Image (cartoon, rainbow, N blue to C red):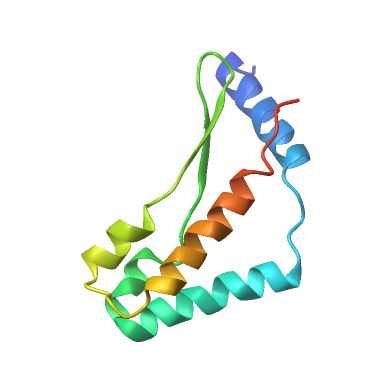
Amino acid sequence: MHSSFFTSRRGFVRSLCATLPVFSFDQLAAATTLGIQFITSNPNAGLDWPVRLLLTQDDNGDVWAVWTDFEWIAKRHNIQDRVAQFKMATMVVGSIISTITAK
């Protein structure tokens, strides 16, 4: 017996998988390089890397993307020498979430 929660969540995950693009090696390499730069500035930043992107769906069917703010990560780990890299990380996440579309 399947619960309606399981069935609806399975459908939700399938629809998300269908809408998310396949990322290129260059995009993945850029994200990895950014993470290494933060960790080399302060190894404790490894607690927040890799950054996770959580997708949720509310009762209205709207999909939301949630992640840890990069400025908060910089403050948490007192990283002051990677401003451009944190800006780039924000742009990368913005690029990823811009690909999430409604069906």
Q: Is residue 52 left or right of residue 11?
A: left
The N terminus is located in which quarter?
Answer: top right
Q: Position of residue 14 (x, y in %)?
A: 73, 34
The residue drawn where x is 57% and y is 70% is 31
Q: Is residue 88 left or right of residue 16?
A: left
In which quarter of the view is residue 82 placed? bottom left
Tell me if residue 44 comes above or below residue 6 in the rendering: below
The residue drawn where x is 38% and y is 52% is 68
The C terminus is located in which quarter?
Answer: top right
Q: Position of residue 44 (x, y in %)?
A: 28, 76
Q: How many marks?
A: 0
Between 64 and 47, the residue placed more toward the observer is 64
The residue drawn where x is 65% and y is 28% is 12
Q: Position of residue 88 (x, y in %)?
A: 51, 66
Tell me if residue 72 comes above or below residue 35 in the rendering: above
In which quarter of the view is residue 92 placed? bottom right
Q: Position of residue 84 (x, y in %)?
A: 44, 73
Tell me if residue 16 comes above or below residue 23 in the rendering: above
